[in-house]
Image: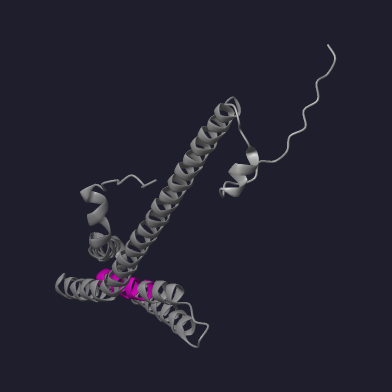
Amino acid sequence: MNEPIVARHWLALAAPKAAPAVATSTVLILGRIWNANGAEHSTGNAALMVVLAAGAATAGAFASAGRAGDPVIAGAAFASSGALALAGVAGYSDGMSLPLLLSAVATAVAYGLTARYWRTDRREAIAHHRHLEVRQSEHGHVERVEALRAGAQIEVAREGAQYAQALAQALIHRETLPGFDPAQLTRAGLPELPAVNTTQEDW
């Protein structure tokens, strides 16, 4: 059976596209809130964010190194490093120009990275949809062939049963006629009738 087609809401379709901008804007807002609560020109807080960002970047580099590297962990680590760096700049700076510039750059980089994954997902979805269509068409063809074959077999069996019934009725009718000789039917090319021994039980 065909699966029902479910129409997704436009918010569900737009949410993945807006996720990078929402993430960078959220980090920027949190950084400015931190700035208003004492992080402005705080060397200790800035050093802490630098250490955390460097650690996240190092973890991402180790996670992506070698054949056994995990791209998901590496991407999460690099994203965390960028978010920490942006939050540190937004919290330390006294103006909005530099934080806004870094937020715009981070948003552009995030969209550039996620666009590749969106293209890959779209290609995989199209390939999967085509594969399902091919399988459905193949199964439909097999089902139609089997239905035709079964119908032909049923029709042949029905015709054979009708022929056998007509032949039996004709033979029964001929047996009642005078001068009936089964041997003549056999010599004429008709199949030999099997001998049937009937015994009459005493009532």
Which residue is rendered at x = 24% and y = 71% of the image? 111
Above or below, 58 against 176 in this view is below
How many numbered marks appear? Answer: 0
**Magenta span:** 80-91
In the picture provided, is 32 more to the left or to the right than 157? left
Report the front residue among 88 and 35: 88
Q: Quadrant of the C terminus?
A: top right
The image's colour scheme reads one colour
Q: Position of residue 158 (x, y in %)?
A: 48, 38
The residue at 38%/56% (across/down) is 141
Q: Visible in this render: residue 29?
A: no
In this rendering, the answer to whether 40 lies above or below 47 is above
Evaluate whether residue 158 shows in this view.
yes
Q: Is residue 105 left or right of residue 69?
A: left
Task: Confirm whether the magenta stretch covers residue 112.
Answer: no
Whether 65 is drawn above or below 87: the answer is below
Q: Main secondary structure of the magenta part?
A: helix
Looking at the figure, which quarter contains the N terminus?
top left
Q: Is residue 120 left or right of residue 25?
A: right
Residue at the far right in the pictured view:
202
Whole-percent x and y of residue 47? 38, 78
Q: Please report the residue visible at 42 percent of the width from the left and 79 percent of the height from the top.
A: 51
Q: Name the foreground residue: 87 vs 180.
A: 180
Q: What percent of the width, then of the height, locates residue 192?
A: 65, 45
Residue shown at 17% from the left, 71% from the top: 100
**Is residue 86 shown in magenta?**
yes
Up/down of 14 relative to 110, above or below? above
Residue 184: which quarter of the image?
Answer: top right
Instruction: Depth check: give the residue in front, 50 or 2.
Output: 2
